Image (cartoon, coloured by chain):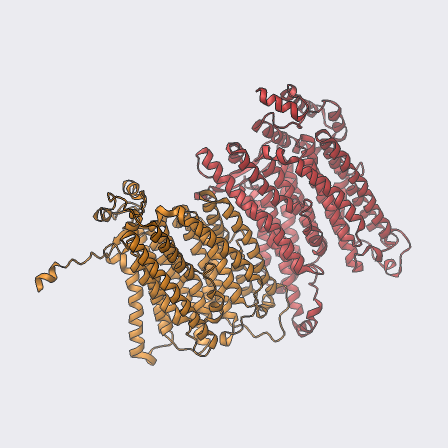
Amino acid sequence: MALSLAQIQTPHLDWLGLSPHIVMAGAAIVLLTVVSLAGPRLPAWFAAAWTIATGLAVIGLAFALWMRFDDGPFGPAGQGLSTAANAIGVGRFAVFLIVLLAAVVVLTVLVADGFLRRENLDVPAVYVLLMLSAAGGMTMVSANNLIVLFLGLEILSLAVYVLVAMHLRRSAGQEAGIKYFVLGAFASAFFLYGIALIYGATGSLNLAEISVRNGWSGFVGVVNTGSLGVTSSLEELELASAPAVVVDKGLLYVGMAMLLVGFGFKVAAVPFHAWTPDVYQGAPSPVVVYMAAGVKAAGFGALARVFMLGFAGAIDDWRPAIFALAVASLAVGSLLAIVQSDIKRILAYSSISHAGFILVGVHGGYADGVASVMFYLANYAAMAIGSFAVVTVMSGPGDENTDISSLRGLASRRPVLAGAFTLLLLSQAGIPFTAGFWAKFEVISAVANNSSVSLAVLAMLAAVVAAFLYLRIVVTMYLEPPDADAPKVNIALGPATAIATVVLFTLAFGIYPEPLREMSQQAITLLAP
Amino acid sequence: MAVLPSIIFMPLLGAVAIALISPARADVFKPLAVAASAATGALTLWLMADFDTADGGFQYIQLAQWVKSAGISWHVGVDGISLFLVVLTGVLFPLAILACNPPQPETTTSSTDSASASTPKTSTAKTSNSKTYYVWLLVLETGCLGAFLALDLMLFFLFFEVVLIPMYFLIGTFGHGNRKYVATKFFLFTMLGSALMFVGTIAVAFFTARETGNGVTFNLLELASSVSELPTDTARWIFLSFAVAFAVKVPLFPLHTWLPDAHTEAPTAGSVILAGVMLKLGTYGLVRFGLYLFPEAASYFAPLFFTLGVIGILYGAVVATMQKDLKRLVAYSSVAHLGFIVLGIFALNTEGISGGLLQMVNHGISTGALFLLVGFIYERRHTREIAQLKGLQKAAPVLAGVFLVVMLSSIGLPGLNGFVGEFLILAGAFVAHRWWAVVATAGVILAALYLLWAYQRVFHGTPDADAAKMTDLSWQEKLVMAPLVGLIVFLGVYPKPVIERMEPAVNALIQHIEVTQTAELPTVNNRPAGSFVELRELITEHNHTHDDHTHDDHGHNNHSHDDHSHDDSNSSQHGAAQ
């Protein structure tokens, strides 16, 4: 008995490589345990402080990992590591998004803390779910195996379904939760079916293997040059010399399409966007902060990973689909936002149009396109967190006051808040000297240089339409007189810190984008199979 | 060497200072704003004096890496083409700031109830408003100066686009009438043009890098020497993307519809800056980034542009004649004047381009002054309707006199600045495209018609009760108008200081156009030598050395074109023979 146990080979685990995932998920479990045992005896700030500390710890670990892949004793620059039987691959691509997700968690907590106090909600479970969801997202962006990726997707999604319905006294939140859950489950089913079909077509769930089996010869060059950062484990898989297997192209395409449906739902790309305005409007505002910044980053990270790595050989086959999704998202997102009157719905449609922009970056293809997606995600996260944090502050007790008229004359009531919101909106519009301008610059240059100038032109035209909707909000804040009975706006310390952080980020990288740009260009190490 | 960054950032420094001062000290905002912009103006004047007149290249160049990985650099420099636009900006801003106090935002009719509710707050609102007014004006100045001085395509684009924000808020917060609609229209029109230019800017840098195999760069000077590697069609498309952005800004017919609205509803200082400086961003862009980067495409599309220019001249003049609102009339006269400038630029010869450049400065001075005067009248009478103004001459003779001089300069009366520019433009256009110049000359006559008629209605006649009570210009207003009137007369009599600084740069530009593509410019400089040059010297009073210089240059051009014949067919035959 003992002998046979010893013969079972356990996969090698690289603990440092897995540490961000473990810390984030572990901290969630610990918090849940502590809260259920100690409950009311804990100070009110404990859960929030614990979550912030966890987020900062994960950022610290991730930076250690980032340095590890740099030139130095650990190996040549740009390399990643793969662990847990090649199910998890941590390179700078994954590390970049892990840092982003952890930062989103920290800022969301800052916003949520004030919100929960205002609403008299004492639910530490919010923080548990937030951390679990982020752990799921981290798994998604570092998964090299489709089943592991699906696990991450489900952990991320299930936690968010509950978060959306977190506000027990608001029926709109319950409705949004159910809506998001039903549609999300539907999309997950598509995703899972897609995985099954791809397994049927290629006989593998490993992204690198899938890539080789459907005829991508890129790996041979990769092994020689090391440009994608492939470690010796590639030889263990005998991928480099593996011949291209004749796969069932039909199955592969249907599977790819179904994966795209699943991702399209998560990132809110048209035509899988229908839930977005309703759920954003109904969900508690801090949860929307996380959904807009975190879920989108995880979704796009995983999408880039699967399509740029697993289906690298089929890029000419999926590019037209990305083109169509991008144009539809840009058009619908910016046009429909104009006719909305609820600020959360406006921002929801604007997030759809941003999804279109990021898809434009995906269309740019490997290297430039991935780098631009990374850059855009980081900057978009800052704008989205800031904008929805302002909405959280403005929405007032009950989280109901989200009509655009509630912003009337904000400039004279709360000049600093109005100024910060204006800067974030201008960044979303891509006005120079904000980070949003450089995000657009990256995406447009990637797509114009590598794949399609016409898509670049369409995207910029959509950006003009979108500028109109941001101006509309600015007009309301600056050029319309305040209502006489406008409620007093109270800004708690937490949201104020979050807004100040993202405003600083937006300005600093708007004026000098070079550091972030360099990082995003290194954050393209997709795999270490 | 750091004079250009000081010029660019001096106003911004003032804006930051004003932004940081407590609203309780609202009385220092205006002196501070005037001081910051006057210091900038003084620096630009020093720049003009220190400028090397013999050098046709860029001077005071400053180059530093900025976004290194994308090939974007902080690259500024000035040459004879941008020098006077910089000086114009430096001079107009302090005058505009000095002349106009921040207008109180008009409360819209729908908000009367809330206005009464917020009466206790009005005093604080006023001060914070005057604060934003000066902050935005100074930010705007930084943006304009940055755009004129940038020698990096992306840097230019950044400044070109960012000027929208202050102008948007100036029109939106301090404008008249339907200001929200107008501000948004202005913003979206301009942004639509620049969205295409954004793609064009990226495309020209990346595609050129691909053709040459070097790293990506947005450096204007490097691109200008390597951009000819691009395939002709690509270059033409990219030129169009730039040209549309600039045509919206100019504005060129039929993209002009935002202009009358924006000018009319803007506060006086906003109109002065909009007409005097911001429209020049478009014409300057056409010269700097259209002709300089894409000479072949520019000459290919030249017929389109000078035709639109001529349409603009006639259309602007005819519509201006019909206007009931004095400010709107001046706004439409801008459409006509900018049509002249575009016509001169796309004549693609030294006279046309120098005339266009000179006219940019002239238009800035005279239209800026006209908007100021209309603003003064509006402040006194609270109306701009021509029909309600009558006989102002009796009550305000100084105002009437100044208005007359400025108006005559706008018409192009010989001896005043407008004449020199218009003459050079028409001369250049006549050589290049005879009939277009003939038609455009009708625009000069129409300008006399609508401006004189407006003057007659507003200033002549017997004054009614309101007009009789009108006060004349205050000493402060006289102080503002004096330098403008002085410049109008000085540049009309003695334009040499301007032209001699412009000429080398324009010649270098023409040479660049010819070098990059020989034998493809059928209409440049293929005129009979002598007759025209003499005429021009008559006006510009060149000294002997300068004469020699132009003659030499001229001879050289003729030489290079001696073996070319005079029209398209012949020169294409020549190309085939080669």
Please state the total of marks drawn on the protein image. Answer: 0
Q: Quadrant of residue B443?
A: top right
Question: In front here: A283 or A508?
Answer: A283
The single residue placed furthest to the bottom in the displayed view is A40
Residue A43: image location, x then y, percent? 36, 77
Instruction: Tell me: residue B566, above or below residue A505.
Output: above
A87 sits to left or right of A367: left
A180 sits to left or right of B515: left
- What quarter of the picture does the N terminus of chain A occupy? bottom left
Residue B241: image location, x then y, percent? 58, 43
Q: Quadrant of residue A475?
A: bottom right
Question: In front here: B280 or B146?
Answer: B280
Colour of the chain lettered B: red
Instruction: Tell me: residue A408, above or below residue B242.
Output: below
Residue B384: image location, x then y, percent? 79, 56
Instruction: Tell me: residue A430, above or below residue B105.
Output: above
Can the viewer see residue B341?
no
A203 sits to left or right of A426: left
Colour of the chain lettered A: orange
Instruction: Tell me: residue B99, above or below residue A127.
Output: above
